[in-house]
Image (cartoon, helix red, strand yellow):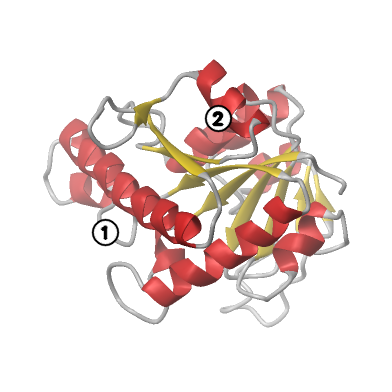
Amino acid sequence: MKYARILLKLSGEALMGEQKYGIDPAVVAMIADQIKEIRALGVEVGLVIGGGNIFRGVAGSTKGMDRTTADHMGMLATMINALALQDALEQKGVHTRTLSGLEMPKVAESYIRRRATRHLEKGRVVIFGAGTGNPYFSTDTAAALRGNEIGAEVVMKATNVDGVYTADPKKDATAKRYDKVSFQECLEKGLRVMDAAAIALCMENKLPILVFDMNKPGNLVAAVKGEAIGTLVG
């Protein structure tokens, strides 16, 4: 394996499948199968999941809701997704722990960095829920933060496109995909990799980001093996 420890970033929308809202159990099971496959190869896996399939804090604030309240609701949405994925993984025999950035001891362990790394060393998949535990920070930033804290070798951002393009490939037929792109170029050109805070955090700590399409079977395994898929930002 090229990577021994990864931070996998999933959007909440990835759990919806063809639905317009919520969680599709079949899609969650498919994601769990892919994670189980790389765990069997010895890769240590940390996960950050968004909550956009249930509630997005930024969207709530644009409609007049208090931003802090909206972001806390978004954090709770990520916990729902985290518990759904934890259940799917454990049904497949993958030992999993969910750690929360917000204290909710009857639902999940509170996030402590040393506890998280110890779970990883014991071969458990660790899901980081509730973002950073603070309003005004996206789950992209949470992924960059947790990836750095646990010593991940790469942040893998799973999307529904096969990398980073010069423009939206669904709207511009002339858009070209990058095989590799620098952090600085992402910021200067406004490429939609992750938000600026997440990119800056990864750039400062030299933590690469791999953007790839996880919907294609075998892509996650190919990614941890270091095969040429997606776009490497670094």
Mark-to-mark CA distance, 2 and 1: 22 Å
* Towards the viewer: 66 or 105: 105
Amino acid type at circle 1 is Ile
* Towards the viewer: 33 or 145: 33
Q: Is residue 20 left or right of residue 216?
A: left
Mark 2 is surrounded, within 10 Å at the Cα level, by few (under 14), some (14 to 19) or many (20 or more) other residues, namely many
Marked residue nearer the N-terminal end (2 or 1)? 1
Numbered disc 2: secondary structure? helix
Q: Is residue 179 left or right of residue 193?
A: right
Do we see residue 82 in this rendering? yes
Q: Is residue 99 above or below residue 204?
A: below
Query: Which quadrant holds the C terminus?
Result: top right
The residue at the point 70 percent across, 33 percent down is 152
Mark 1 is surrounded, within 10 Å at the Cα level, by few (under 14), some (14 to 19) or many (20 or more) other residues, namely many
Q: Quadrant of residue 31?
A: bottom right
Do we see residue 165 in this rendering? no
Amino acid type at circle 2 is Arg
Numbered disc 1: secondary structure? loop
The residue at the point 15 percent across, 51 percent down is 63
Residue under label 1, please give it: 54
Residue under label 2, please give it: 146
Give residue 141's position: percent from left, percent from top. 50, 35
Residue that sits furthest to the front in the current view: 93
Give residue 3's position: percent from left, percent from top. 81, 43
Give residue 207's position: percent from left, percent from top. 73, 32
Q: Is residue 51 above or below residue 73?
A: below
Numbered mark located on residue 108 in the image: none
Q: Is residue 91 left or right of residue 114?
A: left
